[in-house]
Image: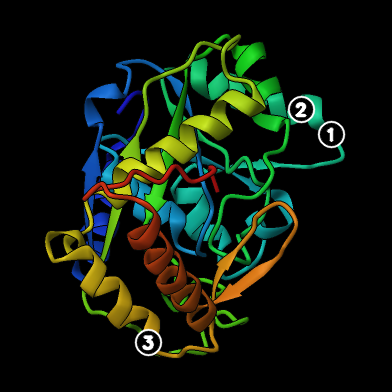
Amino acid sequence: MPGDSAIERAFYFIACGIARLVYRVKAIGIENLPSGGCLLVPNHITWVDAIILQLACPRPVRFIIDEEFYHKPMLHPVLQMARAIPIDRRKPREAIRRATDQIEAGQFVCIFPEGQLSRTGTLARLQRGFEMIARHAQAPVVPVFLDQLWGSIFSFRGGRFFRKWPRHFPYRATVGFGVPLSAEEATIPRVHEDLLRLGADCFEQRPELRQHIARRAVRGLKRSPFATLVTDGMDGSKLSRGKLLGVSIALSRYLRKTSPDQRIAIVLPAS
């Protein structure tokens, strides 16, 4: 923990200990984290993503946060103790300098590249801020994917935050750390692609996949058939559970009639 005081270390261990009572976080790809400073770029699903990421990370993380939130009376003492990095969007050069100073000091710095919480549970367009920080600091960039959090009370599932019952307790989540990219490699298209790949890796870790996936899928789609299940992160088009089940059954029947093979591979576009 480079440069941390005894008080900050105590806060780190106490806060993480309390959070572990509520969340059970599984980390994959820990070996990809560099020994020195770096820039973490995760997807953004819930209000507690910072807590989830910190539980998965073996070292304290300095989160970049909008100055407006940093100075809110209820949040300021905690964010100050956590040594979050407040930035003013109107002063991008100062924000880049602050982040660079922390990375050069050997810290893990985190910025959520989407710039806002997901409203659909899918990865949204990435903003350029992380590119500028990485190139200025000449620091490695580590893509990070947070999985299984869509649907928690802190996510926007159902069109609202907070006003819903927790689905599980303790709540389980998976955090995947990708292979570090150089500052030059860390472009928006490359990071977007790596985040999607990490999402697939995290999905494979879900315990539901240990069951018969087709039977589990049909059972799940039958519940709340009119509820939206799939949303395109680019154009916002939606598909309900019932429609997806109907299309899947129709496709299955068509393939049975037209293909003699027992197994058929289907390649889906990234989403």
Q: What is the CA distance from the residue labelled 3 to the residue labelled 1?
A: 50 Å
* Mark 1 residue type: Lys
**Where does label 3 land, which residue?**
222
* Mark 2 residue type: Glu
The secondary structure type at the circle numbered 3 is helix
Residue at coordinates 47% horizontally, 58% vertically from top-left? 78
Residue at coordinates 45% horizontally, 21% vertically from top-left? 38
Assess disc 2: are there few (<14), some (14-19) or many (≥20) residues with their C-alpha within 10 Å of its C-alpha. few
Q: Position of residue 82 (x, y in %)?
A: 44, 47
Out of 172 and 4, give the one closest to the viewer: 172
Disc on res. 259:
none
**Where does label 1 land, which residue?**
91
Left or right: residue 256 compared with residue 129: left
Q: What is the CA distance from the residue labelled 1 to the residue labelled 2?
A: 6 Å
Residue at coordinates 57% horizontally, 59% vertically from top-left? 76
Judging from the image, the colouring scheme is: rainbow
The secondary structure type at the circle numbered 1 is loop
Q: Relative to 258, say whether 190 is above or below.
A: above
Contact between labelled residues 2 and 1, with CB atoms less than 8 Å apart: yes
* Mark 3 residue type: Lys
Q: What is the CA distance from the residue labelled 2 to the residue labelled 3?
A: 52 Å
Q: Where is residue 40 in the image (x, y as percent from the top left)?
A: 47, 32
